[in-house]
Amino acid sequence: MRRDWRVIVVGLGGIGSGAAYWLARRFGPDVLGLEQFELGHTNGASQDHSRIIRYSYHTPAYVRLAFGAYDAWRAVEAEAGEALVIRTGGLDLWPPGAAIPMADYRSSLAAVGVPFEAFDEHEVMRRWPVFRLEPGTQAIFQADGGIAAAARGNAAHQRLARAHGATLLERQRVAAVVPQADGTVVVELADGSSLQAQDVVMATDAWTADLLRPLGVDLPLTVTQEQVTYFACPDPALFAPERFPVWIWMDDPSFYGFPVFGEAGPKVAQDVGGRAVTAATRDFAPDEAAAARVRDFLARHLPAALGPPIRTRTCLYTLTPDRDFVVDHVPGAPHVLVMLGAAHAFKFASHLGRVAAELVADGRTTADLAAFRLDRPILREVHPATNFMV
């Protein structure tokens, strides 16, 4: 194997595959991507058919970042020759006394000039009669929300990265990332061999803390095992993408769902409803208690979506205490860039990959990364308070 590279990307999930693609557009065959499992594996957070993409967010900074996300996916779609974003509209629902402030979403969308509609439970049930909502429920509908085709998007990034000359290798586990005195970075592999690069991009999700700790960075991360379920509902046509939106229940617990896409029925899950695990201790067994919470929610609010499970898939959430991303260079190691998506970043995967390429190639980016610094106060606390509701 070639040993010297301009840039090495560690981890080829959603963000890492995006970074490999955008870096390959800048550096071609001088880009190496390393994946510890096989490409397209289900051990992390980035596979399955679908993820939500939306402008609707709780801060103006995330709304502005979403503009970059849509723009980056359009560029990938144009080169790949396939649709990777499917617009269905996005519906956010707040029951009375909801734990997540609706005002944050309305003000953030308005501040950035994103059009949206706000209405009550009667209008929701008029437009989508499958919902059963209690009096006082409020909603925001944003027409550009929809589905980011997750597995297809990853595969497109990887295919195009290779077309631009990048080398992507499977089953290459990285044991350590070691900055050198001369400014280069050595990547030590588990087989005892080593590689060298001018820059390293770490997109390692649940494995991030283990690689950062030897560099003097001890992030207070929480890893949970989550799951999504596809249901064989009685009438899947009611949930066709052209007539039913992606949706999020803005309360604690929070639930979210999709129209029919990739399987023969709608997909529904609880957000941050799983047990704490590590990348080493997780398993792939469905959690029946979590499944029961989803079924109970559907029975109350979306009974037409209920049916026998078609498939339940597990994944990992790697959560910062404030659930904001990490996009920053390691202190004292300016050629090691960390990218961590805090379990809501797939929609931004291509844009974050483009940001990584800008930071590596140009030393700067127009994206606002102020909230994503590694040295922000909450990441320096030993036992920080957590808030995973976004």
Image (cartoon, rainbow, N blue to C red):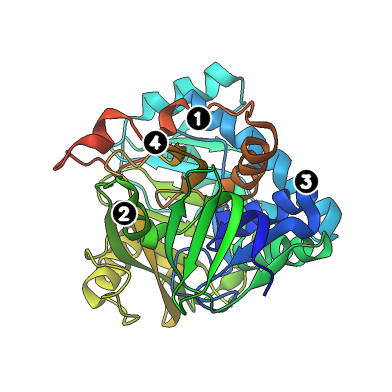
Tell me which numbered mark, 3 or 1, is placed earlier along the sequence: 3
- Mark 4 nearby-residue class (10 Å; few <14, some 14–19, many ≥20): some
* Image mark for residue 26: 3
Q: Report the Cα–Cα distance between label 3 and label 4.
A: 25 Å
User: Label 4 belongs to which residue?
Assistant: 331
- Which is nearer the N-term, disc 3 or disc 4? 3
Q: Residue at x 51, y 57 (%)?
A: 186
Horizontal side of 370 relative to 110 (left or right) equals left
Q: Amino acid at mark 3?
A: Arg
Is disc 4 placed on a helix, strand or loop? loop
State which mark lies toward you, 3 or 1. Answer: 3
Task: Residue at the far left: name it.
Answer: 383
- Label 1 residue SS: loop
Residue for badge 1: 369
Considering the numbered disc 3 on the image, is that residue within a helix, a strand or a loop? helix
Q: Residue furthest top?
A: 111
Q: Quadrant of the N terminus?
A: bottom right
Question: What is the quadrant of the C terminus in the image?
Answer: top left
Whole-number angstrom distance, CA of label 1 to CA of label 4: 15 Å
